[in-house]
Amino acid sequence: MGLGLAALGRPAYINLGRDGALPAERTVAAMRDATWRVLDAAYAAGVRWADAARSYGLAEEFLAGWLDERGHRDVTVSSKWGYAYVGDWRMDADVHEVKEHSLPRFRDQLAQTRSLLGDRLAVYQVHSLMADGPLFADAGLLRALAGLAAEGVRVGFSTSGPSQAETVRRALDVEVDGRPLFTVVQSTWNVLETSAGGALAEAHARGAHVMVKEGLANGRLAVDPPPAVRKAAERHGVGPDAVALAAVLARPWADTVLSGAASAGQLTSNLAAPAVVLSEDELAELGALATPPGEYWERRAALPWN
């Protein structure tokens, strides 16, 4: 498992269950301390993958400071470019992030990421790539991404929305100078949103490293779990979050499953998941929870930033 920093690097986000987990006053200093506490807990538990993004507020800065202070050199660091954080550290900002997949944005954000993370950056991903996005027709941008890959940084992409499967398949077919460009895929998969599963299995079979985000459906499966999740949690003596994540870990194509924990306590609960072995009957019950992708993403879009 890995740790995603979306819920820790900025004061407002759409994840449920953050109110009691984060500092009452979400100042930069308080959020930095909270991030370091979760990173310390993750490292102590054996987690060695941390995922950030330019749009996660100060997540890259918090992560870089923690790595410098602790001296850890065995943590795989991935980040993302394409969205810019424009929330000005406000809870009530009208707009929190702005998306742009262009060559100038890539160059600017790569420079910003490298100024913080330096050579510790192992994976750099296009943030929320879409199947109909401009990147696919931008030869200059594709060549620049290939240049980054040639330097030893794995190039990947993340996906969101009801067309994730189409995006994954189209992106994996992109080649520059006869070589596949993308070797890492990060997509949403959880028991409520399973539509990308087939495409992610194909990605894994083709040698791509598959990362899974939002395994708890932005906290919905932990805060208000369906009866099937709750009953399985009771049978296994764990929280519903661990059952939901165990269902993701049961996918043979899932290489790294991200926890989006906002506190050390949430992380500890999440990390019970690898020890949960779900039966075929339980997996079938959880599989029946899947909703139509359009319905799932419409509900996700309605989640408030708080």
Image (cartoon, rainbow, N blue to C red):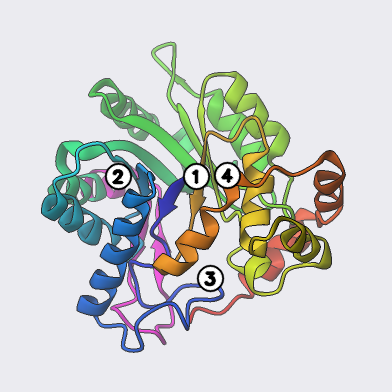
Q: Is residue 301 above or below residue 157?
A: below
Q: Which residues are magenta?
A: 81-108
- How packed mark 1 is, by other alpha carbons closer than 10 Å (few <14, some 14-19, many 20 or more), is many
Precedes in sequence: disc 3 or disc 2: 3
The residue that mark 4 highlights is 274
**Where residue 15 is drawn, which disc sits there?**
3
Precedes in sequence: disc 4 or disc 1: 1
The nearer-to-camera label among 2 and 1 is 1
The nearer-to-camera label among 4 and 3 is 4
Answer yes or no: do the residues labelled 2 and 1 have beta carbons within 8 Å?
Answer: no
The residue that mark 2 highlights is 106
Camera sees residue 81: no
Answer yes or no: do the residues labelled 4 and 2 have beta carbons within 8 Å?
Answer: no
Q: CA distance from mark 3 to mark 1?
A: 18 Å
Q: Residue at x 52, y 72 (%)?
A: 14
The amino acid type found where label 4 is placed reads Pro
Element at badge 1?
A: strand
Q: CA distance from mark 4 to mark 3?
A: 22 Å
Indicate whether residue 90 is drawn in magenta. yes
Specify the quadrant of the image occupied by residue 11.
bottom left
